[in-house]
């Protein structure tokens, strides 16, 4: 009976370890697997291009990340330039992507999550006030003022943000993310800008506000600052 119990326990532990290992991008089993975006095969990720067809430009992108992005057209005064597997096919199966983020004075990258990636952010210019909130039940808030050259980590899946507190100076940051396709869920967009909309009865009770407030919020234009 003891041996049987130990076997069950071992099986459960192995299952937990395996599920944890599969929670991030799968490890490559070859030198590279350049994404074949024209393939009709559907897999978790993107199928590999035939090695014979791989070119050096599959690993290259003239992204112009040294050049400032336009933040004037955004209500939240920021612009995220994401370099993921959809823009750089050579990233496929390598578990990494990056972004340049430009912030106008008083601009922000609003509260959002990356469901598939941890993010490490480096400030290149200016200063940023950043933070993240832990999961239920604690919902502990960690925040920090960052200056040029500082680095900050946002754990995978947690709600986080960046804000440029300056009234007259822009800020720039580079983010590295631990997935070829990290995903982004902007909280306000998802809650108040979903298609079709979430019932206002549900949101009014969840946020403990009058339905008119919810209706007004749902009527706003919730823009995406990712490019």
Image: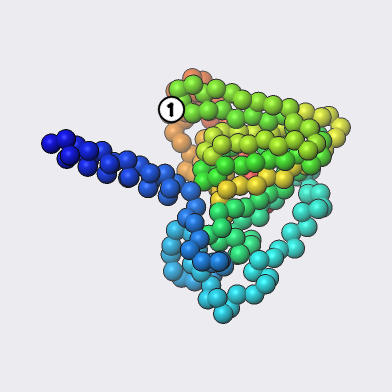
Task: Please tell me which residue lies in front, 88 or 68.
Answer: 88
User: Is residue 31 visible to us here?
Assistant: yes
| 167 on left or right of 210 | right
The residue furthest front is 3
Q: Residue at x 44, y 33 (%)?
A: 199
Q: Position of residue 151 (x, y in %)?
A: 71, 37
Residue 205, compared with residue 163, is above or below; it is: above
Query: What is the quadrant of the N terminus in the image?
Result: top left
Task: Please tell me which residue lies in front, 212 or 28.
Answer: 28
User: Is residue 107 visible to us here?
Assistant: no
Asked which quadrant contains residue 89, the reply is: bottom right
| 23 on left or right of 78 | left
Where is mark 1, residue-wise? 201
Asked which quadrant contains residue 143, the reply is: top right
Q: Position of residue 3 (x, y in %)?
A: 17, 39
Task: Please tell me which residue lies in front, 123 or 107.
Answer: 123
| 181 on left or right of 22 | right
The residue furthest right is 168
Crowding at mark 1 (Cα within 10 Å: few <14, some 14-19, many 20+): few
Task: Please tell me which residue lies in front, 180 or 15.
Answer: 15
Q: Residue at x 52, y 23 (%)?
A: 139
The residue furthest left is 1
Q: Secondary structure under badge 1?
A: helix
Q: Residue at x 67, y 35 (%)?
A: 152
Residue 173, compared with residue 145, is above or below; it is: below
Q: Residue at x 54, y 39 (%)?
A: 156
């Amino acid at each position: 009976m003891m041996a049987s119990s130990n076997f069950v326990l071992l099986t459960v532990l192995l299952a937990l370890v395996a599920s944890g290992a599969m929670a991030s991008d799968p490890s490559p089993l070859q030198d590279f697997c350049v994404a074949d975006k024209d393939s009709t095969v559907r897999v978790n990720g993107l199928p590999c291009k035939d090695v014979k067809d791989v070119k050096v430009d599959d690993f290259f992108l003239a992204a112009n990340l040294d050049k400032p992005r336009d933040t004037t057209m955004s209500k939240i005064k920021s612009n995220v330039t994401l370099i993921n597997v959809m823009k750089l096919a050579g990233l496929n199966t390598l578990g990494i992507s990056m972004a340049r983020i430009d912030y106008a004075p008083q601009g922000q990258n609003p509260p959002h999550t990356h469901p598939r990636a941890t993010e490490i952010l480096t400030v290149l210019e200016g200063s940023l006030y950043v933070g993240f909130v832990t999961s239920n039940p604690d919902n502990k808030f960690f925040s920090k003022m960052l200056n040029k050259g500082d680095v900050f980590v946002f754990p995978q899946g947690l709600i986080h943000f960046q804000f440029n507190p300056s009234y007259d100076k822009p800020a720039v940051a580079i983010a590295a993310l631990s997935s070829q396709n990290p995903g982004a869920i902007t909280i306000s967009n998802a809650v108040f800008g979903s298609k079709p909309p979430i019932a206002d009865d549900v949101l009014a009770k969840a946020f403990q506000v009058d339905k008119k407030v919810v209706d007004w919020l749902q009527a706003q234009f919730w823009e995406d600052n990712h490019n």
